[in-house]
Amino acid sequence: MPGFLAAFPDGMATADPEALARNAEDAWLASRLPDAVFYPESRESVIRLAQWASAAGVPITPRGAGRGYVGGCVPIRGGIVVNFSRMNRIREIDPRDGVAIVEPGVITAHLQEAVARIGWFYPPDPASAAESSLGGNIATNAGGPRCLKYGVTRHYVLGLEVVLADGTALHVGGRTHKNKVGFDLVGLFVGSEGLLGMVTEATLRLIPRPPHRVCAAAVFPSIESAAGCVEEIFGAGLLPSALEIADRFTLERVREFSPEPLPAGQAHLLVEIDGHSAGVDAELESLLPLLRRSGSGEVQIGRGGEGCERLWRTRRSFSMALKASGLTKLNEDIVVPRRRLVELVRLGSDLELRYGFPVACFGHAGDGNIHVNLMVDRSQPGADRHAQEALDLLFRQIVAWGGSITGEHGIGIAKERWWPLAVSPEVRALHERLKNALDPKGLLNPGKFVVVPQ
């Protein structure tokens, strides 16, 4: 794109083949080389780019750290990838107001570490926190294990600075913790997957850091007994900060992959409690006999940051262990009402029997957001067709149960096929009207699940 490169001779624009290749894919299966990559360094450079692309009719695809699982930042129509990695400054941390102001390229864990040093807390914690960027988290409304008690990314976004497709820059929200002036435009952009605008700055809510935490990792004789224990925990009036579950196949892979010892059992439940030490200890005293009554075997206890992280290392190894199996891992982040957890596990077993490939289930049992992973040997004849048929059955049942086909990854390309199943024609039409209003030329992240009506 010689015209584009000539318009931005300041080192932010490139068509270098290595840069194109690095920006062609995310953690999913799709890949498409862009025609160029733009590395903005300020809001003004994003405005300039959007104005140029709008006038030239060139598509632009915003990109965070590229850790998404649905192809959301894959430039499937070519054009320009806008890579925000250079806009990585934490502009302000103010404990008096309880806010942090950040650029979109800040790595999630870097903000968490910075606020923790002064006794504050940014709770959203996607599994990729050490690699994912806050801009990407905002684009997908990312979740994580702490959603159960603390909520998702949207609950911590107070204000945004956004550049629209034509280069219009606007501020929505602010730095106050309550703001009811007009429509919830912050909520409109959070989770919009780069289809409505490009975030160039975010004002995020912080809370005081809980002074104490404790984890209990329990093994169970079956995934059904572990899922049943989740109901017992809530029935006892406990609200853990995280409540994670894993099935037999996942644990078998972890035992092969991880050096961390994992007691024998067919299912795993990790429960974290945080708060003041007296309250945490009292909740733990209530939790332990409940785990035993539900059928748990050995229970490992971790206290404080170091003790809890020892147990979390096992949890964080689940995805890597499954990938190390050599099978293609189709990671679906479905959500079901909590009372359907046992039925979901049985559905996974049914899919295994019907199609012959393992189905590994693990994830956030506390809010019903389970990662159902189809473990597919794509070298086998018909493997891709069978995987699609299995996903059809999975998603249709999830929707029939009143669940959601995605809890934190988004639609992107990977779930576009099931977008009409997930929402009504009226809701799809509303998405199209909003897209048309903010991006009438259809240049922002084109080719994804919402297109501009022709």
Image (spheres, rainbow, N blue to C red):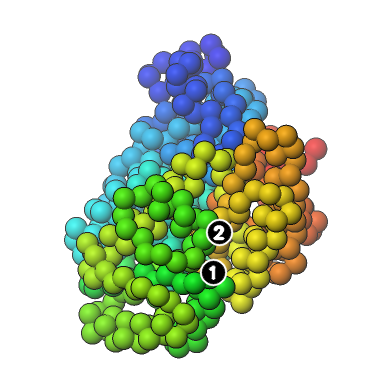
Question: Mark 1 or 2 closer to N-term?
Answer: 1
Counting from the top left corner in percent of width and height, residue 381 is at: 73, 34
**On the image, which quarter does residue 440 sit in?**
top right
Label 1 – label 2 distance at C-alpha: 9 Å
Q: Is residue 68 left or right of residue 108?
A: right
Residue where numbered disc 2 is placed = 361
- Viewer-side residue, 52 vs 409: 409
Q: Is any part of residue 312 visible from this angle? A: no
Q: Is residue 452 left or right of residue 32?
A: right
- Furthest toward the front, the residue is 264
Kind of element beneath mark 1: helix
- Viewer-side residue, 247 vs 441: 247
Counting from the top left corner in percent of width and height, residue 373 is at: 58, 52
Residue where numbered disc 1 is placed = 223
Kind of element beneath mark 2: strand
Residue at image position (53%, 70%) is: 222
Q: Is residue 307 left or right of residue 256?
A: left
| Between marks 1 and 2 in the image, the one whose residue lies nearer the viewer | 1
Q: CB of mark 1 within 8 Å of CB of mark 2? A: yes
Q: Amino acid at mark 1?
A: Ile
Residue at image position (53%, 76%) is: 225
Q: Is any part of residue 69 visible from this angle? A: yes
- Furthest toward the left, the residue is 118
Counting from the top left corner in percent of width and height, residue 281 is at: 26, 83
